[in-house]
Amino acid sequence: MNDDSAEAHLRERIPAAIYSTSKEASTVVAREISDVMHSRNAEGSPTVLGLATGSTPTGVYQELARLHKEESLSFAKVRTFNLDEYYGLGPTHPESYTAFMERHLFSKVDIPSDVAVVPDGTVPREEVSAYCESYEKSILEAGGIDIQVLGIGRTGHIGFNEPGSGRDSRTRLVELDALTRADAAQDFLGEENVPPYAITMGVGTILDARKIFLLAWGASKAAILAKAVEDSISEALPASFLQEHKDANVLVDEAAAAELSRHRHP
């Protein structure tokens, strides 16, 4: 590595681990999760996972389901808290994150349904604030999140913490950015059908997790990923707050790594 490439690598305030494929990276994350689960299961202690939705984490969930089926990884002592949910969608709506988690993980493992928690998108508006406080309390009562899985949106959001979200923000109702809604348009058969609001864990809630995995796949995430790990921390780019975390891990495929300085200036 020459001096220029070394300097480019050092621009990453969170060093990114680059993998040939998203499947390879997803398997690494799933194995890290399973190692913690095995250790906690042996102790008789619960594992608390913070989970994300969308296409990014599906490979992790696929591998966890395989480990359960083929290697007897038990989820009986796991508790999960999902990052977010579209406001106004009930659990039976096909695009709700409750339905997503059922399809991709919960129905494939032995996790008790009462401890696999996704924010309730049907809470009456006047009760949302109290509900969000109770969501935070539930996480604390569970002992806090051991491992948080994240994707990154093209706005730089983690969860649905859009630009302008503060470092200490907690679970709350938020308005979705126009780009976020546009990116979800295909799933909802048109942007006009994408809910304008969501309930999301806050940036501060996410940073409370003991270990974080941020995953990014594909060329569409390359520019925002590079800014999140190389630029200064800013509310304009909520994912940049992960730079403050003592155990934040960034895993990307080759396409998502394309805009990192070490790739642009090898």
Image (cartoon, rainbow, N blue to C red):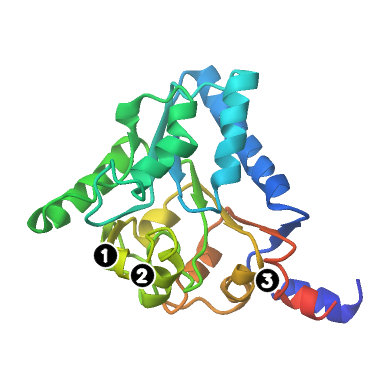
Residue wearing tag 2: 191
Q: How many marks?
A: 3
The x and y percentages for residue 94 are 35, 46
Q: Label 1 crowding class (10 Å Cα cut-off): few <14, some 14-19, many 20+? A: some
Please identify the quarter of the rendering in which residue 200 is found: bottom left
Query: Mark on residue 12?
Result: 3
- Give the CA distance from mark 3 to mark 2: 35 Å
Q: Quadrant of the N terminus?
A: bottom right
Task: Answer with mark 3 or mark 1, whichever residue precedes in sequence.
Answer: 3
Please tell me which of labels 1 and 2 falls first in the chain.
2
| Element class at badge 2 | helix
**In the image, what residue occupies the spot 12% across and 58% down?**
125
Q: Tell which of 247 and 86 is nearer to you.
A: 86
Kindly identify which residue carries mark 1: 197
x, y percent for residue 80: 40, 37
Q: Given this view, does label 3 or label 2 mark the residue nearer the observer?
A: 2
Q: Amino acid at mark 1?
A: Tyr
Identified by mark 3, the residue type is: Glu
Query: What is the spatial separation of the Cα atoms under label 3 and label 1, in whole angstroms?
Result: 33 Å
Image vertical order of residue 57 relative to residue 10, above or below: above
Tell me: residue 198, above or below residue 144. below
> Which amino acid type is shown beneath numbered disc 2?
Glu
Residue 101 seen anywhere in this rendered image of the structure: yes
Tell me the CA gap for discs 1 and 2: 13 Å
Residues tagged 3 and 1 counted as in contact (Cβ below 8 A): no
- Callout 3: SS: loop
Q: Residues within 10 Å of mark 2 (few under 14, many from 20)?
A: some
Of the numbered discs 3 and 2, the one sitting upstream in the chain is 3
Location of the C terminus (image quadrant): bottom right
Image x and y of residue 185, in percent: 41, 66
